[in-house]
Amino acid sequence: MLSPARETPAQSESYHGQRPVDALTGFEVTADFERFNQKYDMFNRAVWDDEVRSERANKFFESYFTDLAQFRKVEGFQHRDYALRNAAWYIADFTADLLELSGDRKEGFLDSYTMFREGATRKSQASAQEHTAELKRAGRFLGADSIGVCEFDERWVYTHNYSRQKLTTKAMDLPEDLTHVVVIVNEMDHAIIETVPSALSGAATGQGYSRDIIAALSITQYIRNLGYRAVASLNDTALSIPLAIQAGLGQYGRHGLLITPEFGPRVRIAKIFTDLPLNADRPIDFGVTETCNICQRCSTACPVKAISFEEPNFDTHDGISHLKGIKKWTINAKQCFKFWANQGTDCSICIRVCPYNRDFSKAMNRILRWMLSNRWRRLALWLDAKLKQGERKTAGWWWRRPADG
């Protein structure tokens, strides 16, 4: 089947240029900025674009149905590894598939969630300060490892949704008058990430998403129960990383990922758009940009060299799967996805080798994190390398570990 004709992503004059919050996040946005059309996401391009679509890509998607996975004798890609990976993805896949055929909604990945009870008709009259404090307490109780708030910023909202059923764009259905975004992150398992690349390591990603879904749906229902509107979103609707940075949850890394103080880049993100009166958090700076400027471990470790060794710039690689008009490190998504497809599972090598991907319950790692935030960062990187942290472990090592260890 021929690929549909390419469309020029929509651009609106109201989205151009810098905003005051950009001075705090480090974003440099120019008048050439263009919002992103979800059709050009690399996973969607694997469905319709002959430049990305391939037999290996098809087998990659099929492998999440365990009987279609191609088991291998090598550790990390055996039957047990795919069995656990796909079990970890179950909640995310189940909720995504629930309305895909009947309603053309792949919720959590292409469309926002709709599975809610009616909320209260009476609105809570608490102050924004009270709502914010209570939301964060409730959010942690309901399953978020970390939670922040930012003001609604339409620059990061997709211009269109996408239908994989009809291979066409759909109108964005997010209300335009919501005022804030609640952003949550959940940790991915540190030990299992140490086995990257492997099908087993993909279980950490699936578990992270599944935990995000439980927390995001529950927090959304809590807000609705307060009498306000709330729209729960996983990878759909808007770009998660800029919103998480604006919500004070972390900084942007060379590998194109959010780096948090608590878990480094080892997180999955969800967000909730709402009109609940809230106070926005302030973006944070704990030295990530300065560390990434000199580190380059992710660039060196990437098998397909999809991560830049250069300084942040306006490079968009192939032009349609990356934001235009914003200066940042941008990975080559096409090369990255090709590696995923070739190995039959997702890759997190850049996460494994990152010096912020450490177990911070250990005092030594907390000291190294502190050193990364100041003039001692070169020494911290040297010590981290000497300790051989971030080196790959076998899947067999993980399976042999004590169940509670």
Image (spheres, rainbow, N blue to C red):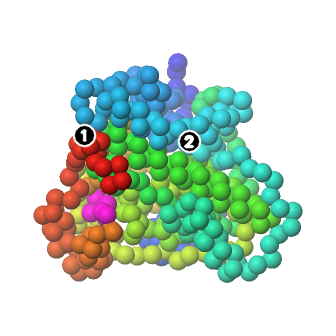
Q: Percent x, y for residue 109?
A: 57, 43
Which residue occupies the extreme right position in the image? 121
**Residue stretch rendered in magenta on the structure:** 354-359
Indicate the secondary structure of the residue bearing disc 1: helix
Query: What distance separates the C-alpha of mark 1 from that of mark 2?
Result: 26 Å
Kindly identify the residue that appears in the image at 21 percent across and 59 percent down: 389
Q: Percent x, y for residue 178?
A: 72, 63
Q: Quadrant of residue 347?
A: top left
Marks 1 and 2: which is nearer the front?
1
Kindly identify the residue that appears in the image at 61 percent across and 34 percent down: 97
**Is residue 136 shown in magenta?**
no
Q: Percent x, y for residue 206?
A: 46, 44
In the rendering, which numbered label is found on residue 396? 1
**How many numbered discs?**
2
In the rendering, which numbered label is found on residue 378? none
Magenta-drawn stretch, dominant element (helix, strand or loop): loop
Residue wearing tag 2 = 91
Q: Amino acid at mark 2?
A: Ile
Kindly identify the residue that appears in the image at 73 percent across and 69 percent down: 276
Rendered position, 328 above or below 78: below
Kindly identify the residue that appears in the image at 60 percent across and 61 percent down: 142
Left or right: residue 43 versus residue 344 is right
Indicate the secondary structure of the residue bearing disc 2: helix
Which residue occupies the extreme top position in the image? 1
Q: Amino acid at mark 1?
A: Gly
Q: Earlier in the sequence, mark 1 or mark 2?
A: 2
